[in-house]
Amino acid sequence: LKEGILSGEAGLREVCAYLLDTQLCHFSGVPPTSFVEIAHPSFNFDSQTTALEMEKEMSNLIANNGDEDKNPNILKRKFGAFQKFVKSNDDVGNLGQDLFPLISTE
């Protein structure tokens, strides 16, 4: 990530860019973007966890319906932006800054 953008902040910035663009009648064409929360068992385990250990823990989570009091290892959650896919032939980083007037990038 770029210097000055902390982990977890990029998604919020993308959502803010979309909301701002909607106020400007989609001037910049930012695709629909939402802030999402997701939980998955793989977020709870490191690369050293065996499949059998993961399966046992998942069984406990399912049996307890995710009740934190019964299971302290409740699924960890992650947050980020979910954005509509837009097909493209290139990345703006590959095009060069001369194609964009300074005023349009500020």
Image: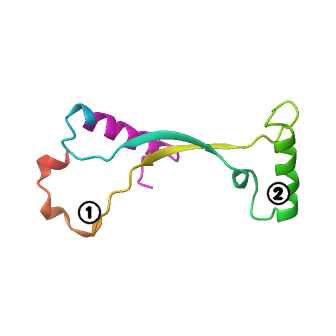
Q: Which amino acid lies under the numbered mark 2 shown in the image of this protein?
A: Met
Q: Position of residue 30 (x, y in %)?
A: 29, 46
Sequence-first tag of 2 and 1: 2
Q: What distance separates the C-alpha of mark 2 from that of mark 1?
A: 41 Å
Tell me whether circle 2 and circle 1 mark residues in contact (CB < 8 Å).
Answer: no
Q: In terms of image quadrants, where is residue 96?
A: bottom left
Residue range highlighted in magenta: 1-21
Q: Position of residue 51 (x, y in %)?
A: 82, 64
Q: Relative to residue 71, is residue 102 drawn left or right?
A: left
Q: Residue at the location (21% across, 45% down)?
A: 28
- Return the residue at label 1: 92
Q: Quadrant of the C terminus?
A: top left
- Return the residue at label 2: 54
Q: Nearer the viewer, residue 62 or 39?
A: 62
Please say whether residue 50 is visible from this viewpoint.
no
Q: Which amino acid lies under the numbered mark 1 shown in the image of this protein?
A: Val
